[in-house]
Image (spheres, coloured by chain):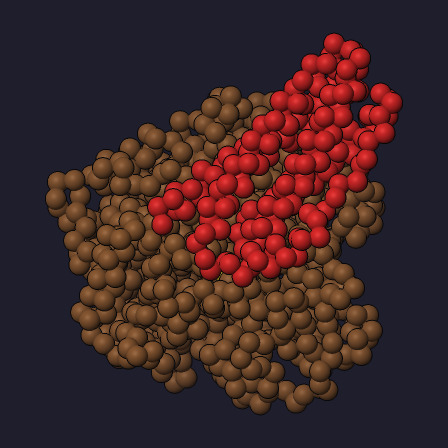
Amino acid sequence: MPQRDGITEPWGARRPYGPGEHWPTRVDSYLADGVTPESVQRWVRSAAVLHSNGDGLDIAVRDSRIVGVRGRSDDRVNRGRLDPKDLFGWQANSASDRLTTPLVRRHGELVEASWDEAMDHIVRRSRELLDEQGPGALGFYTSGQLFAEEYYALAAVARGGIGTNHLDGNTRLCTATAAAALKESFGCDGQPASYTDVDHADVIALFGHNVAETQAVLWSRILDRLAGPEPPALLCVDPREMPVAQAATLHLAPLPGSNVALMNGLLHEIIENGWVDRGYVERCTVGYDDLAATVADYPPERVAEICGLEPAQIREAGRLLGTAERLLCTVLQGFYQSHQAAAAAVQVNNLVLLRGMLGKPGAGVLQMNGQPTAENTRECGADGDLTGFRNWANDEHVAELAKLWNVDVSRIPHYGPPTHLMQMLRYAENGSLRFLWVSATNPAVSLPDLHRIRSILAQDRLFLVVQDAFRTETAELADVVLPAAMWGEKTGTFTNADRTVHLSEKAVEPPGQARADLDIFLDYARRMDLRDADGAPFPAWTDAELAFEAWKRASRGRPCDYSGLSYRKLREVSGIQWPCTEERPDGTERLYTDGKFFAAPDYCESYGRDLVTGAPTEPVEYQAMNPSGKAMLKAAGYLQPHERPDEAHPFLLINGRTIHHFHTRTKTGRAPQLDAAAPEVWLEVSEADAAAAGLSEGDLAEVSTPRGAVRAHVRLGGIREGVLFLPFHYSYWDVDHAASKDGDRAANELTFTDCDPVSKQPLFKVAAAALRKVGDEQPAPTIAPAHTTVHEELVTGATR
Amino acid sequence: MKLGLAIRELHRAEKSMARDLRKTADRHAAEHEVHHVAQDLAGWSEEHVHELTRHGRNYGLHLDERVPGSGPLAPLRTTLAELSAGRPEPGLLLLADLRRLHRKAAGVSLDWELLAQGAQAAKDTELLELASRCHPQTLRQMKWTNAMLKSMSPQILTS
Ligand code: SF4
C-alpha cells in the first residue's frame, strides 16, 4: 500500500479528474504502532470532529481502546481521504490527563467530588438565583463540537425549561457570520451549495478561506481538479501567500479590514460590464437598485486605494468572476473574523445572485463553517436562534415551539434576539449574569482581549460550571468541573458545512466517571425538576436516539428538515444532506434549485438586520420589502476599521488557525504528531518588515498591542507588508516552551473587544500592533517527531 | 426664504447628534457594541454636517463644518467607564443615554422631513437629493437606539 508522511504531505497523492466526473476514491488510514488492519477488532462508524469538512471515517478499536482511523470510501464528502487532524487527533482520547471525576472548588482549590455532590452544588445555586433574580441570572455557553442531540437537549433545557434568553455556542466566534450572511440574503441559514460543486465549477473563488489548512480534504478535491483536464480557475483573496494563493490563477491580498470595499469594487465591475443575469435578478431577488446605487461609488481606483491593491487587479478579478460559467464562491474566517464581517460576506451572496449562480451544478456559495458541528448549534437553537430555524420575532414560530415542548409560550424568552456570547460576558462583567455553564469550549483562550475575559471568568460572584474532557484554562477558573466523554465515547449525529449529516457511534467507554454531555444535561434537567405544562418531566427523552427522534419532530416542516432520517438509515448510508424527508429520502444536494427561497415573511428564520447598525428589521418592514419571499440583495458602504495603525503601533495584526491545530489545541496539542509539527507559536512577517526591524528567520520577536504582548519566533513569509500573522490558540497548559511564559503566548492577549454588529462575531483580524526584536535565533525545540506514516489506498473504479 | 434657517437648524442638530453619539461611546466604553457602533453612526452625522455646510453656501450661510470631538473630558469618561465596568449602575445610565439619543434622532429626522418639503416647494432639487440621501441614515440611527433599548432593558431592569 502506498505510504506518505501525514504531516509533511497533508493533501496526499493526486487523483486527477475532469469537470463533471466523479471524484476518485482514495482511502487514508493511520493505525497506532504495532496495530495492523487485521488485528483491529471492530471498525466503528463516525466522522471527523476536528474541523468542519465532515470527513466520514471509521474508528479502529482493539481491546476496548481506540487504535486508529480509516477514511470511509463510500462517503460523499471525502471519498476515503483524511486530513492530519483526522489521522492523528484521536490519540487525545487516551491522553493521560483526561478529566475522570467531577471537581468542586473548596477553600479556593478544585478537589475531587462525587457526581451527586457536584450536581447538587450546581442545582442549589441555580435555584437560588432563579428565586432571587429570575432566569436572566443564568447563562449557558456551549460548543461547536457536540452532537445535534446534545444541542437540542441544551436548547430545550435552557429556553424551554429554565426560560433564559442567555444561550449561545462558540460558533459565535467561528461562523456566526456564515449564518448571519445566509439569513440576510436568503431569509434563512443553511448552505445553498454542496461540496460536489467543486467537481463542476469552472471558476472557484475563495474569499478569506484558507481551505488548504482549514478543510484539507476539500483542498485535495480542488487540487485533484487542478491536476485534471480543464481545471477551474482559482481566485484567492487573502493577505497571506498561503498554499491556496500559490495555486491561484489570481491572488488578491487586500489590507485587513477592507473586505467590503473590495467586494463592492468587484460588484461594481460586474454591473458596469453588464455581467448581471438580468432575468434571474428580476425573477428571484429584491433590492437591486439599492445595491447598484451603492456599488456605483466603488470604482476600481477608489477600491484599490482603500485595499492597497492595483486597479488592474480588481478589474481582472471582476472579469474572472463576471465571465465564469459555473462559479463557486466560498467564504471563511478571513471575512468572518474581520471588520464589517457580515456586510462583506453578504456581498459574496450578492455576487452569486447577480450572476444567477445558484442551484445548478458547479454554481453556488458556501458560507463555510470552522467547527465540525457548528451547523447543529445553529439549527438546534443552541446559539442565537430558536430551535429548527424558527424566528424569535415571529410569535407564531414561538408558539409552535411552545406547543412542541408543551410549555407555556411565556416560558420561552423572545422579547429580543437571543443574547450573544459577548453580551453574556458583558452581563457577567457588570454582575447581572451570575451563573455561566460552559460546555466543551475554552473561552479563557479563544476569546478576544484575554486579560479582560480572565478577569470576568475569575470573579467570585460568578458561579462558573465547566464541562469538558480536559482541565482547560477555563476549567481552572471554575467552581464546578464536570468530566465529559469525548467523540468516540458516545453516540450522536452531526452535520458539516454542506449539510451532510453523519452518525458517530460510541466506540469505547469514557474514562473514569466521565459522562456523555447529553446525559449531563438531562441529569441537570431531572435534578432541577423541570416539567412541562402537564407536569411531566421535561425534556422527556432519555437517550441519544430518542433525542434524535425528538429533534426530527422539531425540525419537521422547517428548512433543516431531518424527518426522513433515522439512526438506521445513517448506518446504511455514509452521510446524507438535509433536508431529508419522506419525499426526499436521499437528502438534498443543493438548495434553491428552482429560484425559490425560505424567505417568505411567515416562514423565514429571520427578518434580518441593518448591515451597519445591526438593528433587527421589524416584521412589517420585512413584509413590505420582501412580500413574496425572494432572495435579498443588500448593500453596505465601507467603514474604516475601529482600530487603525498609528506611529506607536504601525502594523496590522491578524491571527488564525493553521493545519495542525484546532480550537485552543485542547485535543490537537495532545496528539504527538500534531504537537511535534507545530509546538510553538510563531509570527509571520514579510521580508521587508523583518529587515526593517532587524529580524531574521527564527529570531525571537515581541508583537504588542495596547492590550498586551506575545513573544514568538519569526517566520519570514509571503505576507503583505505592514501585516503580521500569529496562529491563534496557543495557550498556557503546556508552557514549558522557550518562547512562552504566562500571559505572553496566546494571540488573543492582543485582540480587542469588538464584534460585528450583525452577526455579533468577535473580530480577531484587525488590531494595530508594534513589533520589536527581543532575542537572537533560538535552537529549534528538541522534540522527536512522532511516527507520521499513513497509508493511502488508491481505489480504482470507484462509484458514487 | 426661510430654507436657510431650516438648514442652519438641521446643521446644529446634526452636530449635536454627532457629539452625543461620541459622548455615549466614551461613557460606555465597556459596552463594546454601543461603543463601536455609536462611533460609526457619529460618522454619518458628521458627514451630514459637511454636506449641509456645503449646501448652505447656496443660501449665503457660513456654517462651521468642524464637529468638535467628544471634548477634553473624553479620556476621563472612557477611563471612568472602564473603571466602573464591573458595576451595575452604568446600566441605567446607558438606558438613559440611549433614550436621549433616540429622541434626538427623532428630532433630526423630523427636521430632514421639513427640509425636504421646503426643498420641493423651492424646487431645489440638489437639496432634495441631499435630504433623501441623508434622512434614511437618521432613521437608521433611530432604529438602532430603539433596538439597543429593546434588547438591553430586560436584563438591566430585572437584575
Ligand atoms: S479554530 Fe476557532 S475560529 Fe477556527 S474553527 Fe476552531 S473555533 Fe472556529
* Location of residue A511 in the rendering, given as x and y in whole percent from the top left corner: 27, 76
Task: Confirm whether residue A175 shows in the render.
Answer: yes
Q: Quadrant of residue A521?
A: bottom left
Above/below status of A483 relative to B34: below
In this view, the residue in front, A709 or B24, is: B24
Q: Is residue A5 left or right of residue A239?
A: left
Question: Chain A, which colour?
Answer: brown
Question: Chain B, which colour?
Answer: red
Q: Total label count? A: 0
* Location of residue A785 in the rendering, given as x and y in whole percent from the top left corner: 54, 85
Q: Is residue A781 left or right of residue A121?
A: right
* Location of residue A485 in the rendering, given as x and y in whole percent from the top left corner: 30, 68
Q: Quadrant of residue A483?
A: bottom left
In this view, the residue in front, A631 or A664, is: A664
Task: Confirm whether residue A47 shows in the render.
Answer: no
Residue at 55% x, 36% y is B100
Q: Residue furthest left?
A: A535
Above/below status of A606 relative to A138: above
